Amino acid sequence: MSQIVDAKGLACPQPVIMAKKALSDITEGVITVIVDSEASRENVRRFSESQGCTVTVTEKDGDFHLEIAKGYTCTVPGQAEIPTHPTGKKRVMFIQSETIGPDEGLGKQLMKAFLENMVELEDHELPERMIFVNRGVFITCLWDQTIEKLGQLEKRDVGIFSCGACLDYFKIADKLKIGKVGNAFDTVQTLIQYDNVITLG
Amino acid sequence: MLRNISFNDGNPDLIVGLEHSEDAGVFRLNDGTFLVQTADFITPVVDDPFMYGRIAAANSLSDIYAMGGQAICCLNLVCYDSCNIKSHELRNILLGALDAVREAGAVILGGHTVDDREMKFGLSVTGIVEERSITRNNSARPGDLLILTKPLGMGILTTANKVDMASEKSMETATAIMAMLNRGAAEAMNEVGVHSATDITGFGLIGHALEMARASNVSFRLSTDTIPFLSEAVDLAGMGLIPAGSYANRQFAEESVLFEANITDDKKMIYFDAQTSGGLFISVSTDKATRLLEKIRKSGASQAEIIGKVTDLQEKYIIFA
C-alpha cells in the first residue's frame, strides 16, 4: 500500500516539502502526492525527478495524482503499467485536422463517421484522452452532431482537450462546445507518457 | 478584468493611463511639470523585517524610475495581522522602507493600515518627470540594444528561502539586489537619453519584455549568454521551488517566445520567473549603449548587461538565441 500525501489547496512550495519528507522516510517504494494546481504538479514532478525518482501523473476529478517511485529504476510500476494496462485504456487519440486523407470533402465525412462511431466502442476500448489540435479544434467548436457524440464519450470518462493556442489562432476560443482547453505542456506530456497514440487527420 | 471599463474620459492632461500596461501613470500638472504616480505592495520575500520593508519600498519606487521620473513623496500601505505580529517587527518594516525612501530623496507623508491575516507592505509613490524624460514602454526601435540592470532568479530564490532551501550566501546576494534602488540606473538613463524602458517585476523578464515588444511592434533577440541570473536559482528550479506566478507567466507568454538556444527547461524558467524589485529593462540606440551600461554599473548595478537587440517584428516577439 503506497503512502498518500494530500497536498491539495497548499501554495508552492509546500507540496514539494511534503513530498520531500515522505520520500526521505522511505528507502524504496512508491508514494502518491495529490495536488490541485498545475504549478504544484510541475514543482513536485521536478523535485522528484531531481532526486532520481520516476513520476507518473494522472488527472482525477481536476486533481493531479503523482505516483513517485523511489529506489528502483527498471521495474517502476507507474511506467511499466502504461503499455500493459489490463483495460487497455491508456490510449490517446491525437486529432490534428478536420479531415482524413487527401480529399477534403471525403475526408471530413470520414472524420465525422470515425468519431461518431466511437460511441459504439466498449468502455475498455475507449481512449483515455482525445486531443484536438490545429484545424482539429473546428470539430470541438462547430460540428454539433459530432460534439453531441463526444459528449457521450466524455460522460464515459474520455478526456476531451482542445489546443488553446489553436483556438486562439483561429479566433474561435469562445465557440468551444465540449471538453477542456489543453496547453502545450499537457499535450506533449500526454504524448510522451502514453504508449499508444493514435493520430487522425 | 479591466477590459470593458474606460478609465480615460478624455481629460487632455491624462498622458499615460491604465490602457497602456505602463509602469506608472503620468498626469500633466502644468506645461512644464508632469506627475507620475504608482502604488504596489507585496507579501514578505525575506525573513528580516527591515530588509522586507526596504525591498517592498524599492519595488514600489521602481515604477517611478521605469517612467524616467524622480520620487517625491510616499504613503505607507500596511496590511498586518495585529494579533500575531510583534510590534518591533512592524516598526522595522517601516524603518526599512524609510531607509529606501530617504535614499530616493523622497519623504513619507503618511499612510494607511488595514488588519489582514497575511502581511503585505508597500508604498504609494508620487513623483515628477520632465516631459523629455518620460520613458514609455512602447517606443523600442529596431537596431536598439537592450540592457537589463539586475540579475534574474529572485522569485525562485525567495520561494526556496520560505522552506530554508536556498543557501545563506545566495539569499544575501538576492536580498542586496532586491533592496537596491533603480534610481541610479534611471538617472543614467535620463542623462544618456533612451528610447524605451520598463522594470522587471511580477511578469518576469519575458512578460515585461513582451509588453514592450508588442507595444513597440518589434521583436527582441535576447542572448542567453549574457542575461544575468543567480546561478543557484537554476538548481532550485530543478528541485521544483518555482513560484506559481512564474508558471502563470509561462502559460501567458510562451506562445510569443521562441527558444532557438538549446537550454534546459530549468533555465527557461529563470526567464519566466516572477521578480520582486527587479532591474530596469532599457531599449537604447547602439551608439549610446556602452556609455549607458558603464554609467549604470558605476551607479551600483554592477551586474547590468547588454542582453540583446531589437529587430523588426518577427513571427515571435521574443527570441532567445
Image (spheres, rainbow, N blue to C red):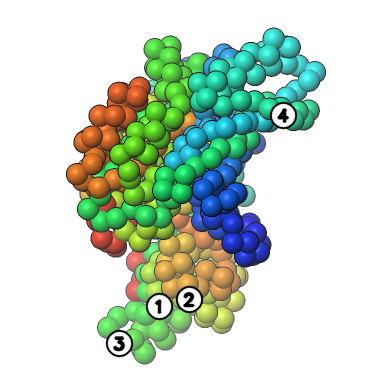
Q: Are marks 3 and 1 in contact (CB under 8 Å)?
A: no
CB within 8 Å, label 2 to label 1: yes
Evaluate if marks 3 and 4 touch, with contact meaning CB atoms under 8 Å apart.
no
Chain letter of the residue carrying label 1: A
* Quadrant where the C terminus of chain A is found in the figure: bottom left
Label 3: which secondary element: loop
How far across and how far down the image is residue B216, in percent?
A: 37, 58
**Residue drawn at the location 52% of the way across and 68% of the way down:** A173
Label number found at residue A103: 3
Residue A186 horizontal side relative to residue A159, left or right:
left
User: Residue beneath label 1, please?
Assistant: A98
**Element on which disc 1 rests:** loop
Q: Quadrant of the N terminus of chain A?
A: top right
Which residue corresponds to mark 2? A139
Q: Residues within 10 Å of mark 3 (few under 14, many from 20)?
A: few
Circles 2 and 3 on the same subunit: yes
Q: CA distance from mark 2 to mark 1?
A: 6 Å
At label 3, the amino acid type is Asp
Identify residue type, mark 1: Glu
Q: Nearer the viewer, residue B52 or B10?
A: B10
Instruction: Residue at the far front: name it.
Output: B31
Disc 2 secondary structure class: helix
**Chain of the residue on which disc 4 is drawn:** B
Q: In the current view of this chain or complex, which residue is farthest to the top?
A: B88
Quadrant of res B316? bottom left
Query: Residue placed at 29% from the left, 55% from the top?
Result: B141
Is the C-beta separation of discs 4 and 2 under 8 Å? Answer: no
Q: Earlier in the sequence, mark 2 or mark 3?
A: 3
In primary-sequence order, the first of circles 2 and 1 is 1
Which secondary structure, mark 4? strand
Are discs 4 and 2 located on one and the same chain?
no
Pointer 2 chain: A
